[in-house]
Image (cartoon, rainbow, N blue to C red):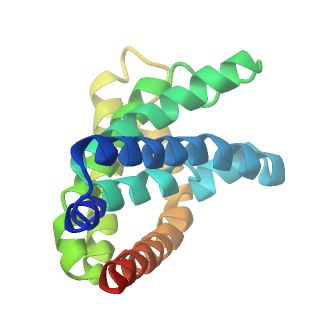
Amino acid sequence: MFEQALTQRKVSFGTKITIKTLVSAGLIAAAVLLPQLVHLALGAPGGVKWLPMYLPVLIGGCLLGAKWGLAVGVLSPLASYLITSAMGNPMPLAARLPFMMAELAVFALVSGLFTKKIAQNGLWAFPAVILAQITGRAAFLGLIALTQSKTQFTAAMIWKQIQTGFIGLAVQAVLVPVIIIALRAILLKERHDD
């Protein structure tokens, strides 16, 4: 969606890269900051319930498309881990990091595959987010099931966490498309005002 808006404004390739890099960095920063705020307000269980890192990743996929969204999805948990490790309290934990990177990569990739449809009609953000959530959580559970003999996690443990996070997913299934539809309206309004 963002790519289409930049192209229609005849933005140069270099400027497009700069703008998308800045937007991606902002989304990654939000993905690092939001979990910290939720954990401060609600403790660690709040993170499992509300899944705050997922929100900017889903926005990144819908807004930036599959490639740039994928980068946001992979780099968000990694940046969070590196920054919070330096502060002495790594989030996510090192053992969980590769699984979360894979899960959020799927979230961003799947939602990003809808970006052209969303540019045509903002309502496509709803199926984009829901499908991304289902496939991302399924990928996470599947990876745990495949590797549970080599990790501290079990499929049953992760399934319980997935169930706990249903409320966060439900809220994001509405909130993210509303944000994307609003951003789409702003981009289209600016384009028509030119």
The residue that appears at 32% across and 61% down in the rendered structure is 62
Side (left or right) of 104 relative to 16: right
| Residue 166 appears in view | yes
Q: Tell me which corner region of the image, top left, top right, bottom left or bottom right, holds residue 68.
A: top left
| Left or right: 47 in relation to 151 | right
Q: Nearer the viewer, residue 113 or 4?
A: 4
The spot of residue 138 in percent (x, y) is 30, 48
- Residues 113 and 27: in front is 27
Give the image location of residue 33, x and y in percent. 67, 44
Residue 126, by quadrant, is bottom left
Q: Residue furthest right?
A: 41
Residue 99's x, y, as percent? 40, 30
Q: Visible in this render: residue 103?
A: no
Q: Is residue 114 left or right of residue 92?
A: left
Image quadrant in which the N terminus is located: bottom left
**Looking at the picture, does residue 168 appear above or below residue 67?**
below
Name the residue: 51% across, 20% down. 95
Residue 142, quarter of picture: top left
Q: Residue at x 55, y 67 (%)?
A: 167
Reply above or below: 171 against 12: below
Q: Residue at x 45, y 49 (%)?
A: 23
In the image, residue 142 sits, relative to residue 182, either above or below, namely above
